[in-house]
């Protein structure tokens, strides 16, 4: 992005998110960044996270429980949130063509995608509830 100064900390935050599949919150990112940059502040982490999501390098997931979650995977995919433990997991978006088709039946514009949020019990919580 033009005019955006290179920041080693921002690159590290992005790299960290690319290695994670569990959609960490800003607090988790902060805890991990502190290992590399002991003097980094939570404010710096927040600023870089919102900057990265503004320029589309990461995805910010709002409305998943309390805190925002962050995703290094910017490919289109959907998310599942466990209502018990609050974990956020990826879901394949294959098969949404039908949904888009149905949603567009009485709509005069053109729908090109959808962002669906699923919720329920994750595998671990499901096992625990059955014990
Ligand atoms: Zn769970
Ligand atoms: Zn994801």
Image (tube, rainbow, N blue to C red):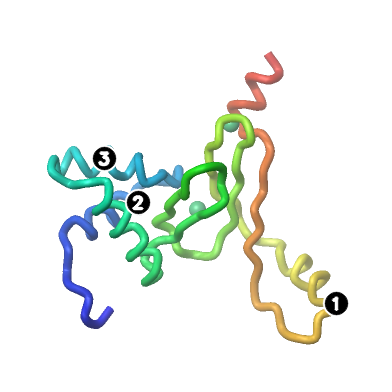
| Quarter holding residue 127 | top right
Chain-order first, disc 3 or disc 1: 3
Residue at 80% across / 86% down in the picture? 108
Q: Is residue 118 left or right of residue 58?
A: right
Q: Are marks 1 and 2 in contact (CB under 8 Å)?
A: no
Q: Using the image as rendered, state which of residue 74 and residue 41 is in the foreground.
A: 41
Q: How many marks?
A: 3
Disc 2 designates what residue?
17
Q: Is residue 63 above or below residue 87?
A: below
Q: Which mark is residue 32?
A: 3
Residue 12 x/y as whole percent: 22, 54
Q: Residue furthest right?
A: 106
Sequence order check: which comes first, mark 1 or mark 2? 2
Secondary element at tag 2: helix
Percent across and percent down for residue 21 are: 44, 46
Residue at 66 percent across and 61 percent down: it is 94
The residues tagged by marks 3 and 2 sit, at their Cα atoms, a distance apart of 10 Å
Report the residue marked by disc 1. Answer: 105
Upstream in sequence: badge 3 or badge 2: 2
Tell me the number on the disc at residue 27: none
């Amino acid at each position: 992005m033009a005019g955006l100064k290179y920041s080693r900390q921002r690159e590290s935050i992005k790299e960290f998110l690319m290695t994670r599949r569990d959609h960490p919150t800003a607090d988790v990112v902060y805890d991990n960044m502190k290992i590399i940059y002991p003097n980094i502040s939570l404010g710096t982490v927040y600023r870089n996270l919102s900057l990265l999501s503004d320029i589309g390098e990461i995805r910010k997931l709002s409305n998943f429980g309390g805190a925002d979650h962050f995703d290094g995977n910017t490919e289109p995919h959907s998310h599942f949130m466990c209502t018990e433990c609050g974990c956020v997991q990826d879901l394949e978006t294959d098969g949404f063509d039908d949904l888009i088709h149905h949603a567009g039946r009485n709509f005069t514009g053109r729908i090109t995608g959808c962002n669906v949020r699923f919720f329920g019990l994750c595998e671990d919580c499901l096992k625990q509830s059955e014990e």
